[in-house]
Amino acid sequence: MNSTTSILGQKYLWKLPAADQQTIASIAMRYNISLAIAQVLYTRGFTSEAAIEEFLFTTFENSVADARLLKDAEKAVDRLLLAIEKQEAILVSGDYDVDGITSSAMMMICLLPLGAKINYFLPHRVKDGYGLSTKTVERAAENNYKIIVTVDNGITAIEQALRAKELGIDLIITDHHRSHDNIPDAFAIVNPNQKDCLFPHKTLAGVGVTFKVLSLLYEKKGLQMPQKAYELLLLGTVADVVPLIGENRFWVRHGLNYVNKTESVSFKLLKDNGKITKSRISATDIGFSVTPQINALGRLEDPRQAVKFLIGSDRENAQQVARVLLEMNEARKAIERSIVDEIEEQIKLKYIDVEKENIIIAGSKNWAPGVIGLVASRFVSAYGKPTLLFHITKDGIAKGSCRSIPEFNMFDALTASSDLLLQFGGHSIAAGLSLKLENLSILKTRLEERIAQQLTPDDLKLKIKIDAEVSLPDLTKKFITDMEHLEPFGNSNDQPIFYIDDLVQVQKPQLMKDLHVKCFVFAQGVVKPVVFFNRPHLFEWLNEHYEQTFVLAARVTENHWQDRVNIELMGVDIALKKG
């Protein structure tokens, strides 16, 4: 690898890792893995035998913490068991994203077989807004519900908790979002992100918290959890983009093993909709092709249909819902594209000046509130700047979704400007908020000032970390098998990016669908295809530098097409060879 520590590519600043070749060779020999895969482990800090084995060979004993360590978990479980025994009505109050939908479905499939008198409610994104509302609490009281269990929400439901108490309802909150200074006065709050909660894994998804509560309940009953729970845990955890480390990593691996052997009616239909034909599905496949379909209903229509779909076993009904999910997902993609185009036009016309400003903020009355979070993620990836997008209501309220970069904690930034906000919640990287339209420019000014104080110009550059160097002859079936030991890939365990040196093109590049660029690269007697997705400008660059030697940053993937499996490179960035 180049002796410099960084390379400036066409889009990114590449950070090259230091490499202790002796240690890397020792890791490769000990575990019988390719040198490049051993280097990935080394680069990511897995250097001791204990750390490597814990990562490669996750076990229940090493990875899974006792649910009793979750503050209030036992209190919540004992109350639910009493409700089942006394046949008291339980209402599950979920959320309209995949995490909330899978959490709600898990409550239903785990508690119904125990004889619970249970129902669920998921708010409509536009009509009801996020989280448990006072109206829902009051309606629950009118219908004689004795317990409300929130899943994937509730940590900010201060007023709703007071109203539940007044109406004699025991409110059990299960959530994973960060709390504000005050917490609700609820019967029980199960959230690993409480300051006084001893549970070691703080990054569970909402469905992970739900699962821990239900697993403790089943343990107390001396019963095995329904197998479907592991599928739901997999879907919600992957969709919520929580770090795939620690306990999350263990359960996603466990869930993948399960769905690759046993397909439920709903999972099979989602897989077919996503045109996944390979025999072994990965977390990446689920994140890109499966969960967006479930999300589409929550983003555009009634999310309760998605819960019915996930917990049902009626194939005909499931097929009908699967068709709706597919249509909704296609509609979501079209809406997303139109918003992206609109914002790109504003950038082109300098209404949003990405050269001078470090925050991208935009809003419209016409943007679907359920899609703007996805669009914000795309702009963070494209420009490396925190992005806040808003749906403007007819009464002048800006309801937004924001996505940030690792260097800028958005939750803390919003907390510092909470005097401007009507409400907000979320995490350091992703959050939701609402404020009066007239305060939007003040919020932007404050966020720009905070970034100027906290970040360096380097922090705001689009960067990639190279994990290891690989050569084209190394890319064999064994290499792919070795790389599978690193899975599942996702947040905090990204698919590795490899550095490949001394490449030349062997034929002119192709532009596909005016969006993607494909070329064939040659080195050391081997030719491999490289595809750059959504990078059309590279078509011209590759033509311009056709005969020159270059270096490549790429991910290594298998392409499954018409019963054939080929190893190909997914291009991340490219640069001319220096010297």
Image (spheres, rainbow, N blue to C red):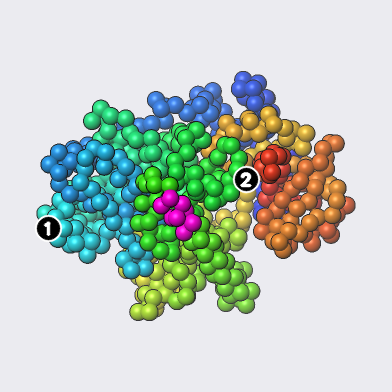
How far across and down, in percent of the image, does residue 121 sit? 29, 56
Residue 202 visible in rendering: no
Residue at the spot of label 2: 465
Up-down: is 476 above or below 575? Answer: above
- Left or right side of 259 for 199: left
Query: Gap between marks 1 and 2, in whole Å?
Result: 54 Å
- Left or right side of 152 for 383: right
Please tell me whether mark 2 sits on a helix, a strand or a loop: strand
Please tell me whether mark 1 sits on a helix, a strand or a loop: loop
Residue at the spot of label 1: 167
Circle 1: residue type: Leu
Q: Earlier in the sequence, mark 1 or mark 2?
A: 1
How far across and down, in percent of the image, does residue 262 sit? 47, 35
Q: What segment carries the magenta color?
A: 316-324
Q: Residue at x 39, y 47 (%)?
A: 314
Magenta-highlighted stretch: main secondary structure? helix
Residue 470 falls in image quadrant = top right
Residue 508 visible in rendering: yes
Residue 248 falls in image quadrant = top left
Up-down: is 540 above or below 151? Answer: below
Q: Residue at x 38, y 31 (%)?
A: 64
Q: Residue at x 20, y 46 (%)?
A: 117
Q: Residue at x 38, y 56 (%)?
A: 305
